[in-house]
């Protein structure tokens, strides 16, 4: 294929990807009551799954401080078109998250034909694992990080004379930013996999710089979470687990490459 043919193929992949986002966004726009009441706003209410079970556990062990979001704050809107623009923005974010597996599939359809058979074999299942890790990251953010972040930031006061009146757009920005950021960070094993395949990292390199990786992951968790140590630890623990998974994957790749090299030489 010529360069223009590649551009034409890329154009149609992009068109289909954008259409998939629009389809999910339209569905989210139509079902706004469910999206906002049961998903977006739910983490700040006492009846939310995490808040309810954490409070029950705190009551059982005698630590009432674990009853987070027990006194939910009210969201306010100060712009004439604020709720409508927020509705559109949330619909687009939901559309992006919902269409993410299909976006990865379209990306693979564009890149796949350029790969050799051996490279396709190594990348087999990439769409599934990338989508799975992203969804797991979003769910982890939604059920663990977001309730804690909402509680910490929504209840924090520099003085009793200052009352928190949280703007709707501010709340939505926090929730969506955390969900998307954690979802992307959970792609760490995939990143390590492809870096190993290209020869940029090795298992020995990953082990040697494990402490440096911990510092980087702590910095990332500090960026996407509120400024409290507990939330940062909650993010770092699964990320370090995923880092160790990446080391295991790197070992398997190197072992397969060594076996393939031995078979060629024999």
Image (tube, rainbow, N blue to C red):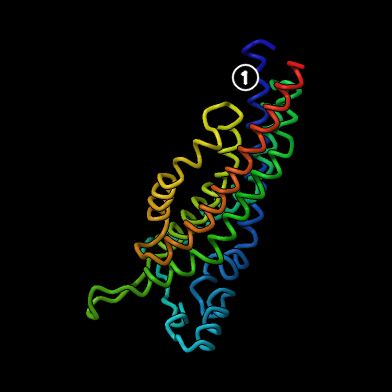
SS category of the residue bearing label 1: helix
Identify which residue is drawn at 70% across, 37% down: 105
Residue 184 horizontal/vertical position (percent) = 53, 47
Q: Which quadrant would residue 128 be assigned to in this image?
A: top right
For residue 229, side relative to residue 206 (left or right)? left
* 34 or 234, nearer to the observer: 234
**Neighbour tally class for label 1: few under 14, some 14-19, many 20 plus, Cα within 10 Å:** few
x 45%, y 85%: residue: 63
Residue drawn at (56%, 26%), measured in percent from left and top? 199
The spot of residue 212 in percent (x, y) is: 40, 44
Q: To which residue does mark 1 refer? A: 7
Residue 259 appears left or right of 152: right
Tally the marks.
Answer: 1
Q: Position of residue 250 (x, y in %)?
A: 61, 37
> Where does the N terminus fall, quadrant-wise?
top right
At x 32% / y 73%, what residue is drawn? 156
């Amino acid at each position: 294929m010529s360069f223009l043919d590649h551009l034409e193929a890329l154009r149609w992949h992009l068109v289909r990807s954008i259409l998939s986002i629009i389809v999910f966004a339209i569905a989210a726009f139509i079902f706004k009551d469910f999206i906002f009441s049961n998903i977006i706003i739910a983490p700040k209410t006492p009846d939310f799954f995490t808040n309810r079970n954490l409070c029950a556990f705190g009551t059982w062990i005698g630590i009432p401080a674990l009853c987070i979001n027990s006194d939910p704050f009210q969201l306010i809107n100060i712009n004439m078109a604020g709720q409508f623009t927020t509705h559109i923005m949330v619909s687009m974010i939901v559309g992006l998250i919902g269409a993410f597996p299909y976006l990865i599939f379209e990306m693979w359809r564009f890149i796949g034909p350029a790969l050799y058979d051996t490279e396709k074999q190594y990348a087999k299942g990439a769409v599934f694992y990338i989508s799975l890790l992203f969804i797991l990251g979003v769910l982890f953010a939604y059920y663990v990080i977001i309730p804690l972040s909402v509680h910490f930031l929504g209840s924090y006061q520099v003085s009793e004379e200052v009352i928190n009146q949280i703007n709707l757009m501010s709340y939505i920005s926090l929730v969506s930013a955390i969900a998307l950021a954690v979802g992307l960070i959970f792609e760490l094993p995939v990143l390590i996999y492809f870096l190993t395949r290209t020869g940029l990292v090795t298992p020995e390199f990953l082990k040697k710089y494990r402490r440096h990786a911990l510092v980087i992951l702590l910095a990332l968790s500090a960026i996407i979470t509120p400024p409290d140590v507990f939330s940062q630890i909650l993010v770092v623990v699964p990320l370090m687990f995923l880092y160790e998974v990446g080391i295991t994957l790197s070992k398997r790749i190197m072992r397969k490459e060594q076996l393939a090299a031995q078979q060629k030489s024999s």
